[in-house]
Image (cartoon, grey):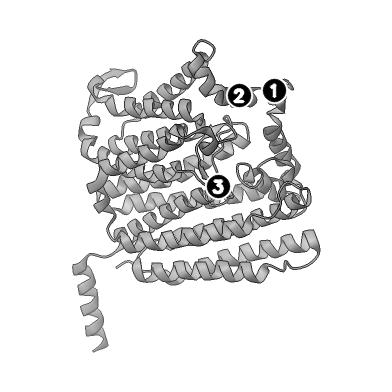
């Protein structure tokens, strides 16, 4: 019989909170020479939210994995610390009128409420398979809305990925990601036998049949449309990458990965090459082309309006951190534009160094490992694919972000899961945590007969 291990979860949550609170105190002592006056409010807020999460999981998902929630609490709490630390410097130098950490705490509260709602409303994740095509349509709508809105309501820094109404703004693609994952898992479960059939063999690869290329062609074309109409290379890469991984898991054919990567790279290169010949594409892809140019030649000095400044400053920030970092509150990460959103990883790298950055990446790796373990333990094929897709979406988004700020790939503008300032991403990530918690609870929950036998054994032993 599996153990519930809610006590282990509680201990890990306490450790996560202590680390975050310790970092908050260190930042205050370093920057102002005193304990931050907002420490009590921050401590009470995060502790209350973590306690709510733990209590809900204890009663609604008692057999869930004991590490998923503590990891999410730690990353969310440490992200709040870094945002608050950057607030202090950015307000001093005039980059912000007021700090955004209180707003992020409000978003965290809403995210926790959404987490609880998912656990209450979805007792059995496999029922989502019934609405495969509805979620697929909803995901496409979420992604397409910014493209059809005027630039004044959807465009920020060249990418049309927002819905902005006054001071409020959301990125609907964050929620479209979850909806499309449900569609991918549901569709591929029903079609995986057909998609697994092999066609001709080329060298060491069993190629799929030509008639089975329809789904990957549709996903490829949709990702190119996202890149063209929303000028967003990162979202296109994220969605197509998730689809490829779920397709590979469903069929266990590496040829799909190779074909898909070749199609995406070739399509992106072709679109960029045609910019100068097709005026329509030129107006849509200038932003993407500029980011590619920044990636290839950040130190050339001929980028228009010094557009490579952000990437170069981010690289200098990482270099200044070295192996052990400058120490929390002792660096100058605010010199990098958008240091609390797109470039929060360079802020962490400067003050915690390569050592701290690698430790943080290991925490993400542990989260993904627990999600993959949930996928392996699940009995239902749909749940297996869905859990795998959710887990991989976190690691792929992290790769895109870290790869962009370290110049491994072009900058994308995606946010770092749990850490970056922003409400849409935080809400979506906590939905992912809730779904993984629910799936792990169902996977580890003993069968009714086994539970009944255990109860009878306990009664006999007490007698």
Measuring from the top left, give residue 198's x and y in whole percent: 24, 25
Residue 216 lies left or right of residue 234; in this view the side is left
Q: Does dot 2 land on a helix, a strand or a loop?
A: helix
Q: Could you tell which of marks 3 and 2 lies nearer the N-terminus?
A: 3
Q: Could you tell which of marks 3 and 1 lies nearer the N-terminus?
A: 3
For disc 3, the marked residue is 166
Residue in the picture at 39% in, 70% down:
58
Measuring from the top left, give residue 271's x and y in whole percent: 48, 18
For disc 2, the marked residue is 290
For disc 1, the marked residue is 303
State how far apart marks 3 and 2 are (Cα).
28 Å
User: Which residue is nearer to you in this view: 83 or 452?
Assistant: 83
Which quadrant of the rendered structure holds the C terminus? bottom left
Question: Label 2: few (<14), some or many (≥20) within 10 Å?
Answer: some
Q: Does dot 1 land on a helix, a strand or a loop?
A: loop
The answer to whether residue 5 shows anywhere in this view is no
Q: Residue furthest right?
A: 33
User: Which residue is nearer to you in this view: 168 or 54?
Assistant: 168
Q: Residue furthest bottom?
A: 463
Q: Could you tell which of marks 1 and 2 lies nearer the N-terminus?
A: 2
Residue in the picture at 32% in, 35% down:
247
13 to 188, vertically: above or below:
below
303 to 108, vertically: above or below:
above
The answer to whether residue 392 shows anywhere in this view is yes
State how far apart marks 1 and 2 are (Cα).
8 Å
Badge 1 vs badge 2, beta-carbon distance below 8 Å: yes
Residue 105 lies left or right of residue 93; in this view the side is left
Measuring from the top left, give residue 212's x and y in whole percent: 24, 25
400 to 39, vertically: above or below:
above
């Amino acid at each position: 019989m599996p153990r519930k291990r809610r006590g282990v979860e509680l201990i890990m949550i306490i450790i996560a909170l202590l680390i975050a609170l310790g970092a908050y105190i260190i930042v205050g002592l370093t920057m102002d020479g005193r304990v931050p006056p907002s420490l009590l409010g921050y401590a009470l807020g995060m502790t209350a939210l973590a306690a709510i999460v733990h209590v809900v999981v204890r009663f609604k998902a008692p057999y869930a994995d004991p590490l998923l929630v503590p990891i999410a609490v730690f990353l969310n709490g440490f992200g709040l610390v870094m945002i608050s630390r950057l607030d202090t410097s950015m307000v001093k130098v005039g980059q912000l009128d007021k700090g955004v950490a209180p707003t992020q705490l409000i978003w965290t509260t809403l995210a926790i409420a959404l987490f609880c709602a998912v656990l209450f409303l979805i007792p059995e994740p496999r029922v989502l398979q019934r609405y495969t095509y509805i979620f697929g349509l909803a995901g496409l709508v979420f992604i397409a809305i910014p493209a059809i809105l005027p630039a004044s309501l959807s465009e920020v820094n060249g990418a049309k990925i927002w819905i902005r109404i006054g001071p409020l703004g959301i990125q609907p693609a964050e929620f479209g990601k979850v909806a499309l994952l449900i569609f991918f898992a549901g569709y591929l479960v029903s079609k995986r036998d057909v998609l697994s059939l092999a066609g001709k063999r080329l060298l060491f690869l069993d190629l799929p049949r030509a008639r089975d290329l329809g789904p990957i062609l549709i996903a490829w074309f949709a990702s190119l449309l996202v890149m063209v109409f929303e000028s967003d290379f990162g979202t296109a890469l994220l969605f197509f990458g998730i689809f490829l991984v779920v397709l590979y898991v469903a069929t266990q054919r590496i040829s799909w990965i190779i074909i898909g990567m070749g199609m995406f790279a070739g399509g992106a290169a072709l679109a960029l090459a045609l910019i100068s010949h097709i005026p329509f594409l030129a107006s849509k892809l200038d932003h993407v082309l500029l980011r590619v140019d920044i990636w290839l030649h950040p130190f050339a000095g001929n980028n228009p309006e010094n557009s490579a400044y952000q990437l170069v400053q981010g690289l200098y920030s990482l270099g200044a951190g070295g192996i052990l970092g400058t120490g929390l509150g002792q660096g100058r990460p605010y010199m990098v534009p958008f240091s609390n959103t797109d470039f929060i990883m360079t802020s962490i790298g400067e003050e915690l160094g390569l050592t701290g950055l690698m430790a943080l990446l290991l925490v993400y790796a542990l989260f993904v490992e627990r999600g993959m373990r949930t996928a392996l333990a699940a009995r239902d094929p749909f749940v297996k694919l869905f859990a795998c897709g959710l887990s991989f979406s976190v690691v792929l988004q992290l790769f895109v972000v870290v790869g962009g700020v370290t110049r491994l790939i072009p900058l994308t503008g995606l946010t770092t899961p749990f850490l970056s300032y922003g409400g849409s991403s935080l809400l979506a990530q906590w939905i992912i945590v809730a779904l993984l918690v629910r799936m792990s609870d169902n996977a580890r929950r003993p069968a009714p007969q086994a539970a009944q036998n255990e109860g009878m054994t306990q009664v006999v032993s007490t007698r």
